[in-house]
Amino acid sequence: MPMLLRLSGVNTYYGQIHILTDVDLEVAEGELVCLLGGNASGKSTTLKTVIGIVEPRTGTVEFAGEDVTGKNTSYRIKQGMAIVPENRRLFAPMTVRENLEMGAYLLGRAKKEDFERVYSLFPLLHERRNQLAGTLSGGEQQMVAMGRALMSQPKLLLMDEPSMGLAPILVERNFEIIKQVHEAGVAVLVVEQNANISLSIADRGYVLQTGRVVLTGPAKDLLEHEDLKKAYLGR
């Protein structure tokens, strides 16, 4: 499969603090990749580097064959990236529909077929389309955040801790939807601490530890890796 995203030798800093060290990471077109690690491992910083919120001091970020290292977040979104941020970050005083519209803001006016595609994945959002986003439950807000990202018809969907703060049944539902998005042809990079559920739907995985990739491989192999079992799978 053609490569969609490639991080090569990425070193990212916050001031003088070295967060990511020589990170290499790839996502092919239509692939689902998970990035695993504990707290302060550098997972969220990796996503921020991919989307352009922070820039690496050295190394490159390539997307769809283009070096986008010096490009801002708006440019990367227009080229086909979208992100579901940690803690969702919805516009609480706006309706569900208005939040979804914001997902297509940089591309111009939202299209009817974009709403229809999102509502087909999340029928509840159609029912709640006129409800204020801030009055929804945590699981419903996560649906809005995912739907908002999909409104731009992304080539690559970035997801930061989609299981955070959700009940187990909602986590399972969210990952079912992530799998559906992947099966529809969208490449997905999921940052997660929940290794079991992430690897169960992923094609490949990476494990970060203190800003370095310490393990990578097919998801099915990582599920059986002894070090990963001890560190993340509770076995």
Image: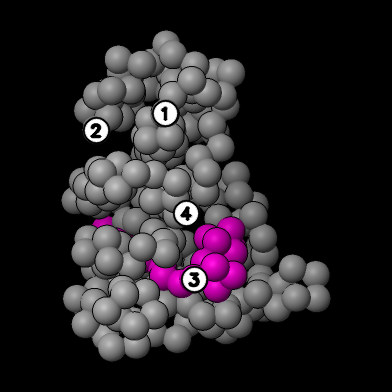
Q: Earlier in the sequence, mark 2 or mark 1?
A: 2
Residue shown at the point (51%, 80%) measured from the top left: 209
Name, please, the residue furthest toward the top: 130
User: How many angstroms separate mark 2 from mark 1 (CA)?
Assistant: 18 Å
Along the viewing direction, whichever of 102 and 193 lies nearer the viewer: 193
Along the viewing direction, whichever of 194 and 36 lies nearer the viewer: 194
Q: Which residue is mark 4?
A: 160
Residue shown at the point (30%, 48%) measured from the top left: 168
The answer to the question of whether label 1 and label 3 lie on touching residues, with beta carbons closer than 8 A, is no
Q: Which residue is mark 2?
A: 121
Q: Earlier in the sequence, mark 1 or mark 3?
A: 3
Q: Nearer the viewer, mark 1 or mark 4?
A: 1
The answer to the question of whether label 3 and label 2 lie on touching residues, with beta carbons closer than 8 A, is no
Three-letter code, disc 2 = Leu
User: How many angstroms separate mark 1 from mark 3 (CA)?
Assistant: 26 Å
The percent coordinates of residue 232 (x first, y second) are 37, 74
The percent coordinates of residue 230 (x first, y second) are 34, 83
Q: Is 191 rendered above or below residue 95?
A: below
Question: Was residue 63 drawn as part of the magenta stretch in this picture?
Answer: no
Q: Which residue is mark 3?
A: 38
Residue shown at the point (28%, 23%) measured from the top left: 124
Q: Nearer the viewer, mark 3 or mark 2?
A: 3
Three-letter code, disc 4 = Asp
SS of the residue under disc 2: helix
Q: Name the image quarter holding residue 31.
A: bottom left
Three-letter code, disc 3 = Gly
User: How many angstroms separate mark 1 from mark 4 (CA)?
Assistant: 19 Å
Q: Which residue is mark 1?
A: 137
Magenta range: 28-50
